[in-house]
Image (spheres, helix red, strand yellow):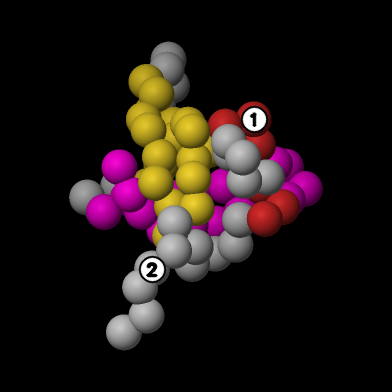
């Protein structure tokens, strides 16, 4: 899936992604993949996988993407 970062809390090490389908997906520091939470910013375009848990789905294997200019 793809989406954009809409919230990041460096203090708590978590954040939220707005997926292309319009759903908000939570993520934690440990799931940011090679991109540390400190490197992710609001507006960054990312690709991720959904992992279904007890409470709600969350984003895992998050990778920052580059958008083509224009």
Residue 55 placement: quadrant: top left
For residue 26, say whether it is visible: no
Q: Which residue is mark 2?
A: 67
17 in the magenta segment = yes
13 in the magenta segment = yes
Q: Secondary structure at mark 1?
A: helix
Number of other residues with Cα within 10 Å of mark 1, as a class: few under 14, some 14 to 19, many 20 or more: few
Q: Position of residue 32 (x, y in %)?
A: 58, 39
For residue 68, say whether it is visible: yes
Between disc 2 and disc 1, whose residue precedes?
Answer: 1
In the displayed structure, would residue 45 be above or below residue 13? below
- Which region shows up in magenta? 1-20
In the displayed structure, would residue 36 be above or below residue 33? below
Residue 66 in the figure: left or right of residue 19: right
Front disc: 2 or 1: 2
Q: Position of residue 38 (x, y in %)?
A: 71, 52
Quadrant, the N terminus: top left
Query: Residue at (22%, 50%) from the top-left corner?
Result: 21
Residue 69 in the figure: left or right of residue 15: left
Residue 50 in the figure: left or right of residue 29: left
User: Residue at the right extreme?
Assistant: 11
Quadrant, the C terminus: bottom left
Residues 12 and 2: in front is: 2
Q: Secondary structure at mark 2?
A: loop
Query: Residue at (72%, 42%) from the top-left corner?
Result: 12
Query: Residue at (44%, 63%) from the top-left corner?
Result: 66
Q: Which mark is residue 30?
A: 1
Q: Main secondary structure of the magenta part?
A: strand
Q: Position of residue 8 (x, y in %)?
A: 61, 54
Q: CA distance from mark 2 to mark 1?
A: 25 Å
Number of other residues with Cα within 10 Å of mark 2, as a class: few under 14, some 14 to 19, many 20 or more: few
């Amino acid at each position: 899936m793809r989406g954009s970062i809409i919230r990041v809390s460096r203090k708590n090490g978590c954040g939220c992604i707005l997926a292309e389908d319009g759903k908000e997906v939570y993520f934690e520091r440990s799931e940011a993949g090679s991109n540390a939470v400190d490197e992710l910013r609001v507006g960054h375009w990312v690709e991720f996988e959904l992992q279904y848990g007890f409470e709600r789905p969350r984003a895992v294997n998050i990778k920052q993407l580059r958008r083509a200019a224009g």
